[in-house]
Image: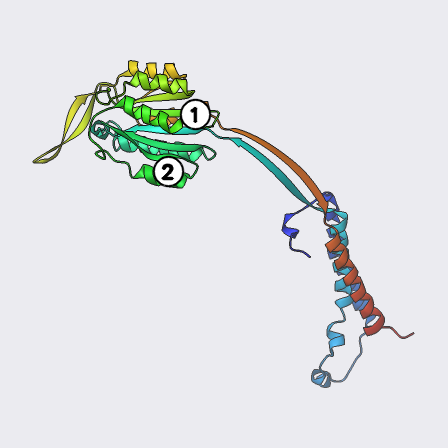
Amino acid sequence: MFDHLYNIKFANPEFFWLFIIIPLLIVWYFFQSNKKFSPIKLSTTDFIKTINPTAKVRLRHLPFILRLLTLIFIIFILARPQISSSHKKIKTEGIDIVISLDISSSMLAEDFRPNRLEAAKKTALQFIENRINDRIGLVVFSAQSFTQCPITIDHSVLKNLFSSVKSGMIEDGTAIGMGLATAVDRLKDSKAKSKVIILLTDGVNNRGLIAPMTAAEIAATFGIRVYTIGVGTRGMAPYPVKTPFGTQYVNMEVEIDEALLKDIAKTTGGKYFRATNNKALENIYNEIDKLEKTIVDEIVSHRKSEEFFPFGVAVGLILFSELFLILVIYRKIP
C-alpha cells in the first residue's frame, strides 16, 4: 500500500503547520490525566510493589495515541499527497563518424605529452564519450591503412580497440590518401543524414596508391564532411631514436602539409585545425563536437495522481481501533 510513498509530493504543504497542535494536545492530555486522580494517604506502600499492572493498565494511553495518529494522517490528507509521473519520448538522429588516425613513427614525437599518438588517442576517447547517440568507427594508417573498428554504437568495443592502437602495427610512412579513402569506404553506404570523417596526421603524404585530393573528391561525392587536424608544434620537435646505447632524442623539423589538409577540408565542406599542444588538441575535438550536434527531439508529458487513499485507509483503521478500545476495553459504567 505504501510502496511508492518515497515519490510523493504535496500540493498543499501549508497544512503541515497543523502539526503544531500535536505537542499542545500531548501537554493538555497529561495535564487532564493528573487532574482525574486524587492522592490517597497510606501508612505503607510496600504491598503495592507486589502488584503487577495488567495489560489494560499498561495500555491506558493507547486510545489517545491512536487519536494523535488519526490527526496526523488527516493532516497528510489535507496536504494532498500526489505522485508525479512523466512519460518521455526521445527521437535521436545520430551522426556516423569515422576517425582516421595517423600511426606513423613520427607520431611518437614528444612535443605532446606523453607523445602525439597517446595524446591523440586520449582526446579522441573523450570525444567518443560525449557522442552517446552516434555510430563511430576507427581507421588507422601509416604506409597503408586498415579499419581498426567498423562504425558501431557499441562504444565500449570501440574504446577497447582504440586503446590497443600503437605505432608500428603496419609499415611506416604517411599515406594520407589511403587513410581518407578507407574511412570514406566505411561511410559511403551509411544512411545517416550526417557523415563525418576526422582525419588526424602530423606529416606529409609520401606513400599510398590514392592521392589525398582524389579521396577528398570521393568523400564530397558521398556527402561526407572531413575535418582535418594537423598535429605538431611549430618549429622543432624531439623524436625518440633507438640506438645501441638506448633511446636518444633528436630534434627534427615539424613538417605538416597544411595546404593539403585545408584543401581536403574545403572540398568536403569541413574545417582544418592545427593542434600545437595537448590543450589545443582537446579544444579542437570540443569544437568539432559542437559543430556536429546530434539531433534529439524530446517530448515529455507529466501526470499527477492523488495518493490520499492509503492515508484514508489508515485513518479508518485507526479510528475503528480507538472506538473498539473506548467502547469495549475501556468502557465507562455510569
Determine which quarter of the picture holds residue 123.
Answer: top left
Which residue appears at 64% of the width and 48% of the height?
7
Q: Quadrant of the C terminus?
A: bottom right
Density class for disc 1 (Cα within 10 Å; few <14, some 14-19, many ≥20) is: many
Query: Looking at the picture, how far across and down is residue 150, in whole percent?
Result: 37, 34
Q: Mark 1 points at which residue?
A: 195
Q: Quadrant of residue 71?
A: bottom right
- Mark 2, Cα crowd under 10 Å, few <14 / some 14-19 / many 20+, is many
Whether label 2 touches label 1, CB < 8 Å: no
Q: Distance between the residues labelled 2 and 1?
A: 18 Å
Q: In the image, 160: left or right of 115?
A: right
Q: Nearer the viewer, residue 37 or 100?
A: 100
The residue under label 1 is which amino acid type?
A: Lys
Chain-order first, disc 2 or disc 1: 2
Q: Name the residue under label 2.
A: 158
Location of residue 14 with respect to 314 vertically, above or below? above
- Which numbered disc, 2 or 1, marks the residue closer to the eye? 1
Residue drawn at point x = 59 percent, y = 32 percent: 298
Q: Where is residue 314 in the image (x, y as percent from the top left)?
A: 75, 59
Badge 2 amino acid: Leu
